[in-house]
Image (cartoon, rainbow, N blue to C red):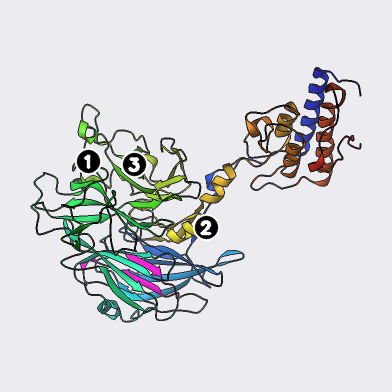
Amino acid sequence: MPCTSSASRSGHVVAVVVLLAAVLPCRADVGPADYMSIRVIRAIGSTANELGYATSKINATSFKQQSLTTFDAPDGTKYQFVSYYDASEKLVVGRRTMLDSGWSDWYLRRTAFTSNNINDAHDVSSIAVDGDGYLHVSWGMHNNSLLYTRSATPAIGEAAFTLVGDTVGNSGGLRSEFSLTSGVTYPMFHNVPGSGDILFSYRTGVSGNGDAQLFRWNNAADQWNPVRASTTAPWIDGDYAGDSLPSVNAYTNYAAWDDQGRLHVTWTWRTGGDSPTPFKDYQSNHNLMYAWSPNQGVDWYRQDGTLYERSGAHAIDESNASPVVAIPEGSSLINQTHMATGPDGTVYVASWWAPNAAEGDHLRQYMLAWRDGDTWRTSRITHRNPENTNASGVSQRVPESALSDFRMSRPIVLVDDSDRVIVAFTDWQRNKKLTVAYSEDADRDDWQIFELPTWNMGSWEASLDVNRWKNDGVMSLFYQVVDVGQSASTVSVLEWNARAYFAALEPAPGDANGDGCVNAADAAVLAAHWFGDATDGPSQGDFNRDGRVDDLDLAILSANWQDAPGAPALPEPASAVLLVLGLATLLIWKRGACATGSASVGFQSTGIARGTRAAS
């Protein structure tokens, strides 16, 4: 075959690429919003939107863990449960089912249970489902007697369910099952991996002088037992009698299990009224503390592996715990944020504080802290503009009374299977819309930030369905605009499929230019490097990364033509013929007499016999 000149071959390549581009246009790019949905909560058989109480943020604050929880039943059915106070100020719990067509509407159980103070955001509700499908609920307390109950029957399935005492009111609950029931705040449930058990934590006492308590639901025995719950040896002690330190309480950042079954907890200390410093409100929050347990909360260890104990007995308190991240009082550190673990067991905490407070700059930033081996590191997620400035333009501390004017929600943090850290929050400087930041670099210094299309959320803070995230890679949040002058507002579930979104960002096999499509532009890259050595992998058409651009890469390109989320996997028949003929023509142009020596090309993977020419 006569050798075709380089210029002629280039012209042929351009012609074929133009032809292919004409018949197979690339899909439009998709963004984060394409993977988000907001579904209003509606009762089965009703067209009316459910309304939640909205004068306070009692339904939508960070320490309402969990507002939502998902239960994957043994038969493969997925259920999601919710709790909130409705417009009549009564507690509602609900269940929906994942069907082939998507989520169903909700079975809603309207109860006679009420908050002790509906306008006190501390009086949150929290839910969990045990291994037998019973729904556990705690609600309505800020230094009040414990309120707790559970469903009378398993709450899974399609049948209606009730809660014990839900027609009686608060006195009809199951408080008597616990040994410590006075002065309770912040109920939080934690499903124990690999079992049907649940851990239940709450605070007894008051801000600046309180103890964290821990109970465990034994699913086999159907009973609650104290793990670290005592007036003398609580889980985390706020006022150890043997030291001279001021009283404190531990504000936990929820808790997180790693893949090895170890339980991790972080917290900040809040100093009480006997503090020697001038800080008496949230500015008295200080330090990031850490403990981990190998046996589901029975024993707790420090960062260095030493046991938290005193005189042979369990003890975690300010005098025997050292901070893993030192954050002094007066640093505008917020309490009760969120934590997670990565696939390698790394512990991450998202929060906000003023990292330059020691230099007099009190500008708050969203921050990430994480355990890196034997040390802890921090990273600044945001670069916020100055706020509450003095005459010199330097940010001053935001008083607690003005936090609503300079609203920064407490963040949540998630880690996916690719070790990507994701942080979600709302910020007054971003019009209080739901903002997502993510980092893929090991040093966590490459933050990418975007906003999801939401309304001004007011004082809303994200409450994450932890099980939905772990099992499905979906960020599922209770969603309600609160504290913007409405007495009631629509309650919904916002879901953002992070797993699908980030998968769409990954180059498809055959995508040489990384634009999300496998099309004529990628064919041109392959043709330009045909039979050449490649050092940069797919960007040079070497899709299998074997260092050569050949028929194996052509097969990958052909198999994934137009392979992109939302795009057809294969071209229409007429276009497919043009694709095959065009690529075959490109292949022929680059072989034969122009290659000295044998003109034989390996075509095994494409089904064309070695040493033969493609049929026309």
**Which residue has dot 3 on it?**
367
Q: Position of residue 94 (x, y in %)?
A: 44, 70
Q: Is residue 193 left or right of residue 282?
A: right
Image depth: mark 2 or mark 1 in front:
2
First in sequence: mark 1 vs mark 3: 1
Report the Cα–Cα distance between label 3 and label 2.
26 Å
Q: Position of residue 420 (x, y in %)?
A: 47, 45
Badge 3 amino acid: Met
Residue density around tag 3, few if under 14, some if 14–19, many if 20 or more, within 10 Å: some
Q: Is residue 146 left or right of residue 474?
A: left
Q: Nearer the viewer, residue 297 or 304?
A: 304
Report the Cα–Cα distance between label 1 and label 3.
13 Å
First in sequence: mark 2 vs mark 1: 1
Q: Nearer the viewer, residue 396 or 588?
A: 588
- Quarter occupied by residue 291: bottom left
Residues in magenta, as a range: 125-146
Q: Specify whether residue 291 is painted magenta.
A: no
**Which residue has dot 2 on it?**
472
Asked if one can make out residue 34 in the rendered structure from this viewpoint, the answer is no
**Which residue has dot 1 on it?**
331
What residue is rendered at 38% in x and 39% in y? Answer: 381
Which label was assigned to residue 258?
none
Q: Nearer the viewer, residue 375 or 30?
A: 375
Asked if one can make out residue 286 in the rendered structure from this viewpoint, the answer is yes
Q: Specify whether residue 138 is painted magenta.
A: yes
Badge 2 amino acid: Asp
Query: Which secondary structure, mark 3?
Result: strand
Badge 1 amino acid: Ser
